[in-house]
Amino acid sequence: MVKAIQQLRDAGIHPTAQRVAVAERLRTMEGHPTADEVLHAVRQTYPTISRATVYNALALFADHGVVHKRTLREGTTVYDLRSEPHHHMIDEETGVIHDVPWDALHVVGVDELTDFDVLEYQVVIRGRLHRS
């Protein structure tokens, strides 16, 4: 809990009990959870927490860079807990989102987009994971 409180304070977020509960649960989750998955996980420990509280906490965390809000699956927003640059591969068969190391792909031409102020970019690959 102390780590979650410090993480929120470092991000400039006042650590209320509800925000700490959401941050603490996020720290134990793997992958790219949706807001509803986070809500379900938080309710395992805090059954009375409201949907609005969890959604508002996630929005605040995203605004302050604690998590990254991504729309990687059609119509579904997920929260990416990794802060270092990376790409994503979505397994079309299972829907699982896999992280792809930044250096595994080489994107060219970003600097030539002179009509845009590119703040960030990533590659999203869709396909199937090879099963051995």
Image (cartoon, rainbow, N blue to C red):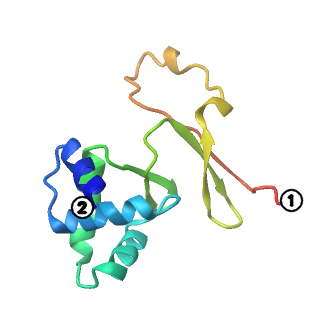
Q: How dense is the environment of label 1, judged by Cα within 10 Å: few (below 14), some, or many (20 and up)?
A: few
Q: Position of residue 82 (x, y in %)?
A: 46, 46
Mark 2 or mark 1, earlier in chain: 2
Label 2 sits on what residue type?
Ala
Label 1 sits on what residue type?
Ser
Determine which of the numbered discs, if any, sits on residue 2 in the image.
none
Instruction: Name, please, the residue furthest toward the bottom.
Output: 47
Q: Residue at x 23, y 49 (%)?
A: 6
Of 75 and 104, which appears nearest the observer? 104
The local secondary structure at tag 1 comes to loop
The local secondary structure at tag 2 comes to helix
Q: Residue at x 38, y 28 (%)?
A: 119
Instruction: Name, please, the residue furthest toward the right.
Output: 132
Residue 44 sits above or below residue 25 on the image: below
Of 22 and 110, which appears nearest the observer? 22
Q: How dense is the environment of label 2, judged by Cα within 10 Å: few (below 14), some, or many (20 and up)?
A: many
Q: Quadrant for residue 55, please give it.
A: bottom left
The residue to which callout 2 is attached is 57
102 relative position to 50: left or right: right
Disc 2 from disc 1: Cα separation: 40 Å
Residue 132 sits above or below residue 86 on the image: below
Q: Residue at x 61, y 21 (%)?
A: 108
The residue to which callout 1 is attached is 132
Residue 35 sits above or below residue 66 on the image: below
121 relative position to 89: left or right: left
Q: Position of residue 104 (x, y in %)?
A: 67, 33
Residue 118 sits above or below residue 84 on the image: above
Of 7 and 72, which appears nearest the observer? 7
Q: Position of residue 127 (x, y in %)?
A: 72, 53
